[in-house]
Image (spheres, rainbow, N blue to C red):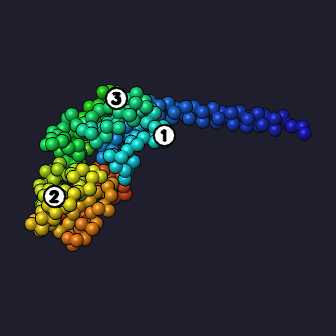
Amino acid sequence: MTLSRNNLVALVCGIALVILVFILLGVVSTKIMDDSSERLSVGATVFPLADMVREVAGVDADVELILDPGASPHTFELSPNKAVELANVELVFSIGLGLDDWASGAASISGADVVELSKDVDINCNVECDPHYWLSIDNAVVMTRSIARELIALDPANADRYRDRADAYILELEAVSEFMLKLVDTAPKDIVVFHDSWDYFADSMGLNIVGTFEPAPGREPTPRQLAELQNVIKSNSITRVYREPQLSESALLPFTKDLNIDIFVLDPLGGVADRNSYINLMLFNAHAIAQ
C-alpha cells in the first residue's frame, strides 16, 4: 500500500503523539511512586492507638495496623502477609506493659524502633500494672501529644502539620469527654465487667467496678470466685454484666442465666463498623453504660 505525503505526515505525527503520551504517563507514574516512597511509614499495635496515629499523621504518613480488628492482643501471631505490610515501617507505636510484647518482633522485620506510650501516662499499678490506659480520654490526650512528638522527630519538615492536627484532635477529644460524662451522669455507677481492663474507663467516667468475671484473660473463675461474684451482684442489685467481643463468653452465659441478668458489650479495641474510630469506640462504650 502506498501512502500519500499527507497520510505519511499524519502517521508520523500520530506515532509521535503516542510516544509522548507514554513518556508523560511514565513521568506521572514515577512522580507518584516517588511521592509515596518519600512519605513516612509507621506501625501501631492495636486499633485505638493506630487511629490516634492516623489523626496526627494525616496525609503525611502511612500507618499500618498490626493487630487485626476483632482479634485479641493476648493471642497475636505474626502472619506472612502482615510481615509484608510492615516491611518498610520506620517506627512502631505500642501500648507496652505486657499487652503487646510482640511489637518488638513486628518491628524487627524492618529494623524499626518501638515507642511504648505508657512511659508518658500515669499507670495504675496494684498487683500488676494495667495496660488498658487508652480507655481514658485524658490519657488519649497525652498519647496524642506523644505521637506528634515522635512523628516530628522522624519527619521535621512536616512538624507544623503534625502539631496542628494533634491540637485539633485534642480539642475534639476534650469535647467528646464532656459529652460522655453527661451521657453516663444518670446511669447506675456500680458495674460488673467480664475482664479486668476497665479501671481507667471507670475512673474517668465516675463508675465503680464491683466485680470481674474472669480473673485473667482466658482463665475461667473457680467455683469459689463465682460464688463471691454472685453475692456481689445480689448485694449491689446488679442487673447486667459487660462482656468483651474479643473474648469468649461461653462460660459467662450459664452464669448470667442462673442469675437472670443481661449481657451488654463494652469494647476495648474496636475497629469494626460502628466503632471505626477511637472516638466512636469511646462513645459506643459510654452509650452502653447509659442504656
Q: Do the residues labelled 3 and 1 touch (CB within 8 Å)?
A: no
Task: Name the amino acid, label 2.
Answer: Gly
> With respect to residue 91, does 48 lie above or below?
below
Question: Can residue 216 be seen from the camera position used here?
Answer: yes
Q: Nearer the viewer, residue 27 or 20?
A: 27
Residue where numbered disc 2 is placed: 211
Could you tell whether 29 is left or right of 118 in the image? right
> With respect to residue 148, does 266 lie above or below?
below
Residue where numbered disc 3 is placed: 113
Residue in the image at 17% along x and 59% along y: 224
Spatial CA span between label 3 and label 2 = 38 Å
Residue where numbered disc 1 is placed: 80
Spatial CA span between label 3 and label 1 = 20 Å
Q: What secondary structure is found at the residue carrying circle 3? A: strand
Quadrant of the rendered image containing residue 113 = top left
Task: Name the amino acid, label 1.
Answer: Pro
